[in-house]
Image (cartoon, grey):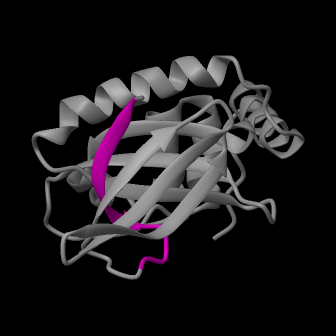
Amino acid sequence: MAKALVRLLHGLELKDPDTLLEVTFDSEFLIIVEKSIKGFKTIVENTFKIPLANFLGSTITTEKDLTEVNKSVIGRGIVGGLLFGPAGLVLGGMSGIGTKKGSTHQVYIVSFVSSNGEVRNITFKMPIPMVSVTQKFDDKLKKQLIKVPRSEAAINILKQAQEQEQYGKPDVIL
């Protein structure tokens, strides 16, 4: 099974924000597991499941690249466009991806439609040895996503993003 070990920067509520998270997937879900060690046992503290049908996109980039542009709705739209292509223009403009200062860590970002229909992003920081492992994980995840029909909410958001690219820049209200 493909997996990545990452640390959270933004997007989830954890019991221990500094814990190493295990990210895997199966045929239906992206699975994020928070574990802790108590004595000689590993305890699962939290498990987050994101339906692959609601998955919008993922990318690996640097935290520095995100913070330099992530100063406005326009900036988030630009970042989203760079990260996710046409869909990213809308995705980036509709939701923040967190702000951190002065770091050049590699980050892994997943974007999805939440159960209440909102576009959400989870941003992870990768330990240096995990960057190539996470890239391989992401490649396998994207191959799995080809087999998964998207939810109506995800289709609508992706369709809106394509229309925005086709007919010009997205409208931004400041």
Along the viewing direction, whichever of 133 and 58 lies nearer the viewer: 133
Q: Can residue 77 be seen in this view?
A: yes
Horizontal and vertical percent for residue 97?
A: 46, 61
Residue 134, image x and y in percent? 30, 35
Is residue 69 in sight in this rendering?
Answer: no
Name above or below for residue 54 compared with residue 158. below
- Residue at left offset 65%, top offset 30%: 27
Which residues fall within the magenta stretch? Answer: 2-14
Among the 4 quarters of the image, the one containing residue 102: bottom left
The picture places residue 61, in percent across and down from the top left corner, at 29, 41
Residue depicted at x 21% and y 54%: 64
Residue positioned most to the bottom: 15
The image quadrant that residue 15 belongs to is bottom left
Query: Which quadrant of the rendered structure holds the C terminus?
Result: bottom right
Task: Examine the rendered structure and indicate whether residue 24 appears above or below residue 10.
Answer: above
Specify whether residue 170 is painted magenta: no
Tell me what residue is drawn at x 77 percent, y 43 percent.
157
Q: Which quadrant holds the N terminus? A: top left
